[in-house]
Image (cartoon, rainbow, N blue to C red):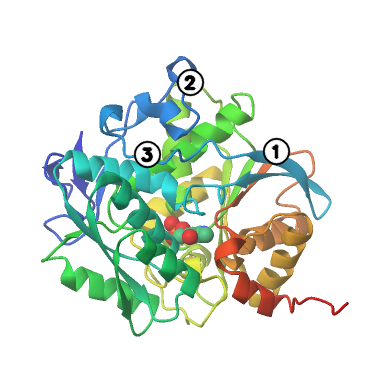
Amino acid sequence: MHYIDSLTGATYPLEAPRWRGESGGHVNLGDAPGLARRDIDSSAHSLWRYRKALLVDAADAVTLGEGWTPLVAGEWDGAPVRFKLEFMMPTGSFKDRGMTVMVSYLKSRGVTEVLEDSSGNAGASLSAYCARAGMRCRVLVPETASYPKIAQIAACGADVVTIRGSRQDVADAAAAMSREIFYASHNWQPFFAEGTKTLAYELWEQLGFRAPDNVVVPVGYGANVLGCDRGYSELLRNGEIKRMPRLYGVQAANCAPYYAAFRAGVEHLVPAPVGPTVAEGIASSKPTRMREVLAPVRASGGEIVAVTEDEIVRALGALAKKGFYVEPTSAAAAAGVSQLIARGAIRRDETTVLVLTGSGLKASETIGKLLKLGARSG
Ligand SMILES: *Cc1c(COP(=O)(O)O)cnc(C)c1O
């Protein structure tokens, strides 16, 4: 196994960690052997139960017990939906699924200090896993990131630096610093999606070793699409499932580069206006892996959906009324499910998984304002 340069096809050894290729383009990992049912270590109640399929040695695992999150049956707009509670991770978001594998890999290859840019959750996750690994960590965040996330990143020991400007400005600032410190961007480093592929395994196992019909995820850079594509493709190649699920990625209409490209029928960035969104975790205007996200979505028969700010807030309230207290970014995916049900793309007789990626506990101030919440005086 080696890194493959996405622009030139050149290969680089995994022994020397890198965040991109000589060409300046991102690098990917080749196909992995994947998993068969008998490979599961059911004594591990974390995603490390799938250790046999991961491209890192389990002896090097830097783990906080992440993964094996609940899959809860319920209803959404009158259709049966399974809610995948990815917000029940050690640091409160699905990012732990990728971070445990990426940090395990980097530590095993001798990296002692890393740099990351993040709207909040990825930084919190990286800071926590670096604390566990005994690695030093610097995280650049937008000035507008919610304070609880900044506090969480700093509490776990990272050096937190705020950068003025857009989410893209933060990413650019980090890339510029990458000569001093190893740039462990989860949006570039392919071992992150090597971790998120366990979402596919987990859903497969929790549904009785079957693929669902539909998986709906919020999409910023697209780690959950990349993970589902990688994981389900491996299961398909190994004969463990009969077909791929339809993959649906949901974006905020105010920042929807994938949606614009999907509509245009292309797999590269097309000019699209960018505005502010309450879904801060998916406010990414320049994602890294356009083709790797769009091609599997199309091939699976799924789509990229865009939802308005009003739809996100409505879904946020409706989820909380069902007991799912998530952050606005996660509610975007639920708003996408509403659209898909309304136009018959998702049907009542199908198995649909809605992935809830981040906890509302980090975003209570914002949620309170959006839903106009308060106590009644007694
Ligand atoms: C990061 C994040 C996302 C988006 O993940 P991408 O890999 O950028 O698509 C969605 N939800 C939450 C809560 C996040 O933290």
Q: Secondary structure at mark 1?
A: loop
What amino acid does circle 3 point to?
A: Thr
Query: How far is the residue under mark 2 from the one under mark 1?
Result: 28 Å
- Closest to the camera, between mark 3 and mark 1, is 3
Mark 3: few, some, or many residues within 10 Å (few <14, many ≥20)?
many
Judge whether residue 285 can be spotted in this image: yes
| Number of residues whose C-alpha sits closer than 10 Å to that of mark 1, classed few (under 14), some (14–19) or many (20 or more) | some
Q: Is residue 34 visible?
A: no
Residues at badges 2 and 1 in contact (C-beta under 8 Å)?
Answer: no
Q: Which callout, 3 or 1, points at the residue further toward the start of the chain?
A: 3
Q: How many marks?
A: 3
Per the image, the residue denoted by label 3 is 63
| Quarter occupied by the N terminus | top left
Indicate the amino acid at tag 2: Ser
Q: Label 1 amino acid?
A: Thr
Q: Is label 3 within 8 A of ligand 1 (CB to nearest ligand atom)?
A: no
Q: Does the beta carbon of the residue at mark 1 sit less than 8 Å from ligand 1?
A: no
* Residue behind mark 2: 43
* Residue at x 14% of width, y 59% of height: 23
The Cα atoms of the two marked residues, 3 and 2, are separated by 15 Å
Q: Secondary structure at mark 2?
A: loop
- Residue at image position (47%, 74%) is 147
Q: Position of residue 103 (x, y in %)?
A: 28, 46
Q: Quadrant of the C terminus?
A: bottom right
Helix, strand or loop at label 3? It is loop
Residue under label 1? 351
